Structure formats: structure tokens, C-alpha cells
């Protein structure tokens, strides 16, 4: 029978006791505001479970822990056998970071509503609490805006896609697209909230905006050009025209976003803006100020630190931790998401069959042993990133994200030293069966299954 020593992430403290409790078990929930935020205490006896919680999130996490203790079958969509039990004892737990996030890019490759809901379930199972939903980019616009229908009718699809990563003209000739209605997104938000996950939306400006420019050419540098949604990967040099009319357009777009997403933090991008001018900086600053006037705080990638007079923001430090230190020194809050440590689209090994190997080599152990250097009151937490240029199906997302996202979940939740040699058998012997029960097609530790390879598709390792 699995015990408290099999849990992932690890609890803060555990006292085991003899005996077992049948599962499903009667659970008595009691408030305990003295516990740390999102914290819980489980007391399991042969007669039932007492779950003492700091808040609603603490109850969600306590119940997730009970599910882990009951064994892998508790993660299946329906019961397939009786006789499951819980080990008796007491566990007290609370998270290390208040922001334990994962970005999912649905702009490069669209993920259906059902697939996003499934991804929320996987985050919740790992006690992650932020889904940063990247909704727009050069290759697609994924949120319906009634005032501007061409954003989805034109910007929501592209005629073709680059396969893999190369410098040639080859494309697959296959149209790709999709978008979410406002009600789709409200459903995702409500579903996530019931699982203690906040959805932080992102609309990228003033770069990564080719899909918007294709829909409304007046937003771009040349309103008479024949724009199209980009079929390449990388960084487009097509930027928004930072005029007052463009600013008014995006104020309207962001106001629509605020009506759907209650998140106190709203993403505005600001990254990878080749040839940016002072006017582009003012554009970002004005959007951030507009969000502040609506009672929200802007999340921008760390390039926005080159802009003067920003309102207090959340900075996603992706280039390196030095940018996080700089953001904190200027009074901004920081979410650490360094590319060279927690970008899960990057290759997982030097295995010859690794599918579409791009970016840095970042192994499971690399992710698990990442230890943020930044400390202090401005550190909100950490976030893993799942960019999807090379992840064209939910199966490919599974392969890239897991099991590295499981390792990330432990570093974001658990305090104290981490030992990969101790983590690995917990993952392999106890957590992999849970992922199997959930239907997650993770990467095996010794390399991809044959059907997970992409031998015909070029990558670009760094």
C-alpha cells in the first residue's frame, strides 16, 4: 500500500500511524485560518479523515493528496475496483511559492477547449495553481472579440505551417486554426477555479502580433500591404503601429478580456520586439496603465524593463535570473521562468530519437534541481513554459511536459533540500502509474516510444 513517502510534491511534515482507512472515506472539513495560505492538515484514522484547511485552495490540495494516497486507480475517470485504502497518519502541508505556474501556448498550435480542461486537471493534480494561457501570436489569434470579428475569421487560422525548424521554404500545406468564444473561456476559467487554478490570459503586444495585423492591416506598419498570418516560427519583424488608434483598438480588446477573466494579473507580452522604438515602449506602458486603471496588474516579459516609467507590474524573468533581480530592484514582482531551466518545449536528452530536438538540453534532473537564486518579498514564484511551435497535438504536449512538469511541481511546492536520487523512485514507481491512469503520454525515462519519435522532422538544438 502506498504511504506518505510516495507523495509528489512532498508534504512539509508527516507522522505515520498503524492501520488503514477504506477509500472513498468520509471526510470532515474544518477551517483553520492560522495555517499558511493554501495549506492543509490531514488526519487519517481507520474511521475516516479530518481535513483542516486554511482556505478553499487548501481543501482542493488536501483532497488531491488523499487521491494520491489511495493509489493510481483513484486517478481513473471511473472506479474499476474496490478495496482501496488510505494509510493512517497526519500530514501538514503548504506551498513554497504562491505562484506555481505553467504557460500553455495555444496560439502556435490551437488546443481545443476539451484539451485545455484536461490540462487544467493535470495542473491541479500536481498542485500547480496558475495557467498562463498564451492566446495570441504571429501564427494565430485564439480569442473571439465581438467588436473585431476579423481577429478570428482571418487571424484565427493560417494556410500552412513550417514542420520542425529549418531555414527553407517548405510548409505542410495544411490549414490550421481555431479559437475560443467568450463562453468557452468563461467555462475554462470556472472549471479551473474549482480546482484552485487561476487562468492568467496573455495577449502579446506590440510584437508577436502578425495575426492581428493580418486581420486589420491598419494596425501594422503598412496598411496597404497584403498581410497574412505567419506560417513560420521564430520572431516576426512585423510590429504594431504604436499610434493612438492602435492603442484604442487594444484598449477595447483588453477590456473584453477583463470581462471574461477575473484574474488580478493580465499578460500583455512585450517580448521580442525587433527594432522597437520609444513609441512602442510608450504603447506597452499605456496598456499597462490602462490595466492598472481597471484594477488589474500587467504581466510582461522581462524585455519591458527597458521601458521607462512602468507602473508596478509582474515581470516574467525568462532571459535569465539577472533580469528578475533587476525587476525586483525596481519594485516589480517577479515570476521566474528562465529559458535555460524551465522551458519544457526544449529537448529532454541527446537521445538520437528525440522528436524535433530544439533549444537547450534540459533533462528531468536539470528541472528538478533548479533552485531560484532570487529571494525576497518581490518573488511571487516560478513558472514552467510549454511553447508549442513543435507540439502540434495534445500527445506531443504530454511528451514535452511530462515528467518534467512533475519535477517542476515539486520544486515550486516543497521546501527544503531536494535529492534527485530520492525523487526518481517516487516518480518512477508511484507517480508514473498515476499518470498512466490519467492517460498522460509522458516521455519514458530511457527515451521515447517508437510512436513518439519524429524522424522525418528537423530540429534545431542549441
Image: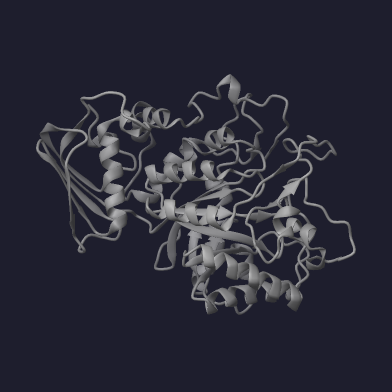
Is residue 442 among what the camera can see? yes
**In this rendering, is residue 155 above or below 386?**
below
Residue 273 at x, y = what percent? 72, 62
* Left or right: 188, with 451 as reference point: left
- The residue that appears at 54% across and 67% down in the rendered structure is 258
| Of residues 5 and 67, the one drawn nearer to the viewer in this rendering | 67
Percent of width and height locating residue 17: 11, 36
Against 308, is 388 above or below?
above
- Residue 447 sits in quarter: top right
| Residue 306 appears in the figure | no
Furthest residue in direction top, as rendered = 450
Residue 155 at x, y percent in the picture: 73, 54
Residue 25 point in image, percent of width and height: 18, 38
The reply, left or right, for residue 118 in relation to residue 163 is left
Give the position of the N terminus as an image quadrant. top left
Quadrant of the drawing holding the C terminus: top right
Residue drawn at x 81%, y 67% is: 218
Scheme of colours in the image: one colour
For residue 85, which quarter of the picture?
A: top left
Q: How many numbered marks have been drawn onto this rendered protein structure? A: 0
* Left or right position of 406 against 49: right
Q: Residue at x 78, y 41 (%)?
A: 160
**Left or right of residue 350, residue 52 in this image:** left
Q: Residue at x 25, y 40 (%)?
A: 66
Vertically, is 108 above or below 432?
Answer: below
Amino acid at each position: 500500500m502506498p504511504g506518505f513517502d510516495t507523495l509528489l510534491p512532498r508534504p512539509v511534515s508527516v507522522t505515520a500511524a498503524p492501520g488503514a482507512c477504506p477509500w472513498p472515506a468520509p471526510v470532515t472539513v474544518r477551517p483553520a485560518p492560522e495555517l499558511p495560505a493554501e495549506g492543509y492538515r490531514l488526519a487519517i484514522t481507520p474511521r475516516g479523515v479530518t481535513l483542516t484547511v486554511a482556505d478553499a485552495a487548501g481543501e482542493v490540495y488536501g483532497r488531491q493528496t488523499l487521491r494520491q494516497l489511495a493509489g493510481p486507480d483513484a486517478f481513473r475517470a471511473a472506479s474499476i475496483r474496490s478495496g482501496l485504502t488510505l494509510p493512517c497518519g497526519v500530514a501538514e502541508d503548504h506551498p513554497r511559492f504562491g505562484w506555481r505556474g505553467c504557460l500553455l501556448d495555444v496560439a502556435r498550435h490551437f488546443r481545443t477547449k476539451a484539451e485545455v480542461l484536461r490540462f487544467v486537471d493535470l495542473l491541479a493534480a500536481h498542485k500547480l495553481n496558475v495557467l498562463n494561457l498564451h492566446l495570441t501570436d504571429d501564427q494565430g489569434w485564439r480569442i473571439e472579440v465581438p467588436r473585431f470579428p476579423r481577429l478570428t475569421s482571418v487571424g484565427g487560422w493560417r494556410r500552412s505551417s513550417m514542420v520542425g525548424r529549418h531555414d527553407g521554404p517548405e510548409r505542410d500545406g495544411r490549414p490550421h486554426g481555431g479559437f475560443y468564444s467568450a463562453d468557452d473561456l468563461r467555462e475554462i476559467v470556472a472549471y479551473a477555479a474549482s480546482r484552485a487554478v487561476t487562468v492568467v490570459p496573455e495577449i502579446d503586444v506590440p510584437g508577436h502580433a502578425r495575426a492581428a495585423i493580418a486581420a486589420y492591416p491598419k494596425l501594422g506598419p503598412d496598411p496597404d500591404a497584403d498581410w497574412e498570418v505567419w506560417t513560420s516560427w521564430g520572431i516576426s519583424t512585423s510590429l504594431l503601429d504604436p499610434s493612438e488608434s492602435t492603442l484604442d483598438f487594444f484598449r477595447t480588446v483588453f477590456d473584453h478580456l477583463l470581462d471574461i477573466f477575473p484574474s488580478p494579473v493580465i499578460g500583455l507580452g512585450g517580448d521580442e520586439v525587433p527594432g522597437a522604438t520609444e513609441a512602442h515602449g510608450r504603447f506597452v506602458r499605456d496598456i499597462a496603465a490602462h490595466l492598472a486603471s481597471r484594477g488589474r496588474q500587467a504581466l510582461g516579459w522581462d524585455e519591458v524593463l527597458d521601458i521607462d516609467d512602468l507602473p508596478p507590474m509582474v515581470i516574467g524573468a525568462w532571459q535569465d535570473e539577472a533580469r528578475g533581480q533587476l525587476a525586483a530592484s525596481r519594485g516589480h514582482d517577479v515570476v521566474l521562468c528562465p529559458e535555460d531551466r524551465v522551458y519544457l518545449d526544449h529537448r529532454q536528452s541527446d537521445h538520437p530519437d528525440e522528436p524535433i530536438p530544439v533549444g537547450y538540453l534540459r533533462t528531468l534532473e536539470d528541472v528538478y534541481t533548479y533552485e531560484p537564486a532570487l529571494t525576497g518579498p518581490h518573488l511571487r514564484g516560478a513558472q514552467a513554459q510549454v511553447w508549442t511551435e513543435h507540439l502540434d497535438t495534445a500527445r506531443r504536449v504530454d511528451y514535452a511536459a511530462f515528467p518534467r512538469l512533475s519535477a517542476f511541481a515539486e520544486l515550486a511546492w516543497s521546501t527544503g533540500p531536494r535529492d534527485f536520487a530520492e525523487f526518481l523512485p517516487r516518480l518512477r514507481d508511484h507517480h508514473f502509474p498515476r499518470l498512466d491512469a490519467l492517460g498522460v503520454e509522458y516521455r519514458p525515462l530511457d527515451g521515447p516510444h517508437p510512436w513518439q519519435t519524429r524522424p522525418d522532422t528537423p530540429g534545431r538544438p542549441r
